[in-house]
Image (cartoon, grey):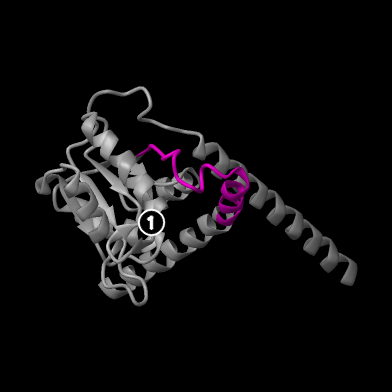
Amino acid sequence: MLRSSFRWLRRFLALAVFGWAVTVALVWSWSRRDDAQQSNERLADAIIVLGAAQYAGRPSPVLQARLDHALALYKRGLSPYIVLTGGRGDGDTQSEAGAGRRYLTQRGIPARALLWEDEGRTTFASMLHAADTLSRIDATTVLLVSDPFHMLRLSVLARLHGLTPKVSPTRTSPISRNPLLEFEYAVRESFAVPADLLQFARHALASDTAGR
């Protein structure tokens, strides 16, 4: 009985390690994709920019890199809207979305082209609120902008929330310029992807139960 239990435990651990390794490989593979690279015509209903730290309304270098990339995509005519995401951190007086909106407005993006959600404080929450925001304008195809390591998880969450995702990661972020740091974030994502899948399942179950 004890030998059988150890045998099953070894199999379970081997399967878990294999699944984790596959997830790391997928995260890394998706980080190399860029659906906007060769396009010069409308590609999506909206560009979604994932939030990052801001300091009293000034985007951090990571957030600025994402905003600059979204700005370039918008100017190429790849989408008529930019959706900014990210709420307030502890002690912040400005949301990440608010800092992004101000930054892009100062660079000539018209107010009518900017949508935002300023409640999400996690990737999961930001994508949930972004999908809700986009439902109001019947937008379904999105171009996701963030650091490369983020692309797989964002794509999975977008699909779970009824959106059709395309990806275009920024390559100018401080994270992207540091290979070791980029790999560290990729490893973190290998745990974040299944965690968000579990969170989505819980959220869907809670919504279904509340609707009965």
**Does residue 143 show up magenta in the picture?**
no
Compare residues 73 and 172 and report the one nearer the observer. 172
Residue at x 61% of width, y 42% of height: 25
| Identity, as a three-letter code, of the amino acid under mark 1 | Ser
Can residue 173 be seen by looking at this rendering? yes
Residue at x 23% of width, y 24% of height: 41
Q: Is residue 197 above or below residue 162?
A: below
Compare residues 198 and 59 and report the one nearer the observer. 59
Question: Where in the figure is residue 86, as x and y percent of width and height?
Answer: 31, 61
Quadrant where the C terminus lies? bottom left
Residue at x 11% of width, y 49% of height: 111
- Quadrant of the rendered structure where residue 145 is? top left
Question: Where in the figure is residue 138, as x and y percent of width and height?
Answer: 16, 46
Give the magenta part as a residue range: 166-188
Q: Is residue 142 above or below residue 42?
A: below
Q: Is residue 89 left or right of residue 188?
A: left
Can residue 143 be seen by looking at this rendering? no
Question: Where in the figure is residue 184, as x and y percent of width and height?
Answer: 61, 52
- Quadrant of the rendered structure where residue 120 is? bottom left
**Does residue 178 show up magenta in the picture?**
yes
Question: Where in the figure is residue 109, as x and y percent of width and height?
Answer: 16, 43
Q: Is residue 155 left or right of residue 49?
A: right
The residue under label 1 is 60
